[in-house]
């Protein structure tokens, strides 16, 4: 609570303490309203306790204000309990509770409550439209808006704004625009702003500009909407010109340009505008965090977040979600835990989107126990929740658990999507569950999912990992389009199953198709050379990475190269590569050299390799066993 509210809170506390049992409802409601507006939860709870003692908490009028007070304080469960406690609920009771759910992003609970309502009015529908819009569920916004019309209700400003700002379909957008004209609201500046936003999302810049020009005195918010429409549609010069002409720029104006520059690939210009933004708020910080995260510059994004905190800006729900994603990409579990702790204290713990981000973060950071605990704490699960859990299991080697939970998800009636199927097939490959994979594959034959690249790529990988090269080949060649992951998956399938020549032929075919290999492709190619005894070709591919493709070999590539020459008995060459590579050799590299020494019976070099191995992994006895064979 800010210090400027302290005197107000003190007076509020004194007023609550002076209640005596015969107070009229207007005074009670005034106090409940003040508690909500001041976010004075402790005082609100104290007032609620008093009302419970005198039996007023179950009355409809007072009970409705209790719900609203808890909603404004962000305590959804207490609001829901207050709703349940009202003996005779009226339409206001239902609409207030519905609004609490929708405004806090709990749209599943909102939909359940909405379906239970004895009747709906425009306020009910507007809560759903606004809630869906804030949650980014544009299809549900469209369905709700059309339902308003079907029920014979007349949309108002709230209906139009929610529907327009979520519409990216040009035909539907024009239809809603025409409805605003019929309602006589087209000249309303708030509606016009929403129309400009809509045309921007529909890539109709000319229509956005025409609507903007119909307003004689556009305010800063409307100008910001047109700046965003320009930038989103690559009219950057127009965006710059309008931004420069603004007499009054607010934080949103600067933020629109930050986002606009970033979307057009001008990251440094975006940063420059951000730094020039006066009185940065949480929205402007969220924007720059998103810019750096989407550009893959996660370390810089995390540094910006630390600076945001040092500047005294408190993270909001969006900040937490973005930073959790950044931590997941970086494997920064310490910072991730701190964000989770902050989110719980800030009252975001019951937010499904944020909880999903927590599960994903722990999964990516290899802390499966914490991921599962975060999942089990969730009161409301959606498809993303299930997908996050499946991925956490699969990414951490618990593929059988991932397959098991996929089946549970199906029993729960949760409709899977392409991410679900891709994760499932990966898990089947990791657990050799080819039977389960085949069953689901057959179920998808008549669907569009097999034409989704992530799903088809995972299928190729699954069949390769399970030793069914023919099925991997058929899936690969049946694909309508292929990317580098598709080709790499097929090369890996060949290499895993001893088809080393075919793996190298596939690399050649990949080049002919104009698809450039990546670093993972070359790991599989070098593996094929290793198992095929093709040491010279393997070293040639290692050199080709940087020379022909601009890919700097990683330690994994050097270790593969050491294995390539080591399997051919060239222990000295393997040792030379280990010493020359720009990384410290790891235990795997020294194991490969030691194995090569066994083939070549080079006891001297073998002893050196064994010693290096033990320095790095003293608890592993494998080096002693391998070294003893050199002297036997």
Image: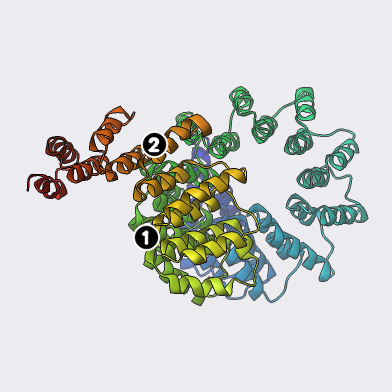
In percent of the image, x 35 and y 37: which residue is there? 558
Q: Is residue 378 visible?
A: no
Q: Nearer the observer, disc 1 or disc 2? A: 2
As rendered, which of 169 and 427 lies closer to the eye?
Answer: 427
Horizontal side of 617 relative to 487 (left or right) equals left
Q: Residue at x 37, y 44 (%)?
A: 534
Q: Quadrant of residue 29?
A: bottom right
Residue plotted at (18% across, 40% down): 613
Q: Residues within 10 Å of mark 2 (few under 14, many from 20)?
A: some
Residue furthest left as drawn:
632
Q: Could you tell me how far apart the alpha carbons at marks 1 and 2 are, in whole angstroms? A: 47 Å
Q: What mark, if any, has residue 210 been given in the picture?
A: none
At numbered mark 2, what does the secondary structure look like: helix, strand or loop?
helix
10 Å neighbourhood of mark 1: few (<14), some, or many (≥20)?
A: few
Q: How is the image coloured?
A: rainbow
Quarter of the image holding residue 428? bottom left
Q: Kindly identify which numbered label has been placed on residue 539.
A: 2
Q: Position of residue 598 (x, y in %)?
A: 17, 45
* Residue 190 is at least partly visible in this image: yes
In the picture of the structure, the residue carrying the numbered disc 1 is 373
- SS category of the residue bearing label 1: helix
User: Is residue 515 toward the left or the right of residue 216 in the image?
Assistant: left
Q: Nearer the viewer, residue 335 or 6?
A: 335
Residue at the spot 57% in from the left edge and 34% down from the top edge:
288
Q: Closest to the observer: 68 or 274?
A: 274
Vertical relation: 308 (above or below) 528:
above
């Amino acid at each position: 609570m800010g210090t400027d509210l302290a005197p107000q809170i003190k007076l509020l506390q004194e007023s609550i303490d002076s209640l005596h049992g015969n107070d009229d409802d207007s005074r009670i409601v005034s106090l409940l309203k003040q508690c909500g507006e001041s976010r004075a939860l402790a005082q609100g709870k104290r007032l609620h306790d008093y009302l419970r003692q005198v039996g007023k908490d179950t009355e409809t009028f007072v009970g409705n204000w209790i719900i609203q007070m808890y909603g404004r304080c962000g305590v959804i469960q207490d609001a829901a309990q207050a709703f349940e406690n009202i003996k005779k609920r009226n339409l206001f009771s239902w609409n207030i509770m519905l609004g609490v759910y929708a405004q806090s992003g709990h749209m599943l609970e909102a939909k359940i409550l909405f379906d239970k309502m004895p009747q709906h009015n425009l306020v009910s529908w507007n809560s759903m439209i606004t809630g869906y819009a804030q949650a980014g569920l544009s299809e549900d916004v469209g369905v709700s808006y059309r339902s308003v019309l079907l029920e014979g209700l007349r949309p108002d400003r709230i209906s139009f704004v929610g529907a327009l700002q979520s519409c990216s379909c040009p035909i539907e957008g024009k239809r809603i625009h025409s409805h605003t004209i019929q309602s006589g609201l087209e000249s309303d500046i708030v509606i016009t702003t929403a129309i400009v936003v809509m045309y921007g999302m529909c890539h109709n810049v000319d229509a956005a500009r025409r609507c903007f020009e119909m307003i004689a005195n556009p305010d800063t918010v409307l100008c910001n909407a047109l700046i965003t429409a320009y930038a989103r549609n690559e009219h950057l010069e127009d965006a710059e010109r309008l931004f420069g002409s603004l007499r009054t720029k607010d934080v949103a104006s600067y933020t629109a340009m930050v986002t606009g520059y970033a979307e057009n690939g001008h990251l440094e210009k975006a940063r420059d505008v951000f730094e020039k933004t006066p009185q940065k708020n949480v929205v402007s910080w969220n924007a720059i965090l998103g810019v750096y995260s989407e550009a893959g510059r996660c370390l810089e994004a995390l540094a910006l977040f630390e600076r945001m905190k040092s500047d005294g800006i408190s993270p909001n729900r969006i900040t937490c979600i973005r930073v959790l994603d950044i931590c997941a990409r970086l494997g920064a579990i310490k910072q991730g835990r701190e964000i989770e702790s902050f989110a719980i204290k800030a009252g975001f713990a019951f937010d499904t989107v944020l909880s999903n981000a927590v599960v994903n973060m722990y999964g990516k950071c290899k802390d499966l126990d914490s991921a599962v605990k975060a999942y089990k704490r969730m009161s409301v699960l959606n498809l993303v929740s299930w997908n996050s859990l499946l991925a956490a299991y699969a990414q951490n080697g618990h593929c059988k658990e991932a397959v098991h939970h996929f089946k549970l998800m199906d029993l729960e009636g949760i409709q899977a999507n392409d991410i679900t199927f891709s994760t499932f097939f990966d898990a089947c490959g990791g657990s050799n569950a080819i039977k389960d994979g085949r069953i689901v594959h057959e179920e998808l034959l008549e669907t569009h999912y097999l034409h989704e690249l992530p799903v088809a790529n995972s299928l190729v990988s699954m069949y390769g990992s399970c030793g069914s090269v023919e099925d991997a080949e058929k899936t690969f060649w049946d694909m309508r389009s292929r990317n580098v992951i598709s080709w790499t998956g097929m090369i890996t399938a060949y290499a895993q199953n001893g088809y080393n020549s075919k793996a190298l032929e596939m690399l050649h075919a990949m080049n002919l198709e104009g698809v450039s290999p990546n670093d993972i492709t070359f790991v599989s190619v070098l593996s094929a050379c290793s198992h095929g005894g093709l040491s010279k070709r393997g070293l040639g591919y290692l050199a080709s990475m940087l020379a022909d493709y601009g890919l700097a070999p990683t330690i994994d590539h050097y270790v593969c190269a050491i294995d390539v020459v080591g399997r051919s008995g060239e222990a000295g060459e393997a040792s030379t590569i280990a010493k020359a590579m720009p990384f410290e050799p790891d235990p795997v590299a020294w194991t490969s050299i030691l194995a090569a020494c066994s083939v070549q019976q080079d006891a001297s070099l073998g002893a050196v390799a064994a010693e290096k191995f033990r320095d790095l992994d003293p608890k592993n006895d494998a080096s002693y066993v391998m070294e003893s064979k050199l002297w036997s």
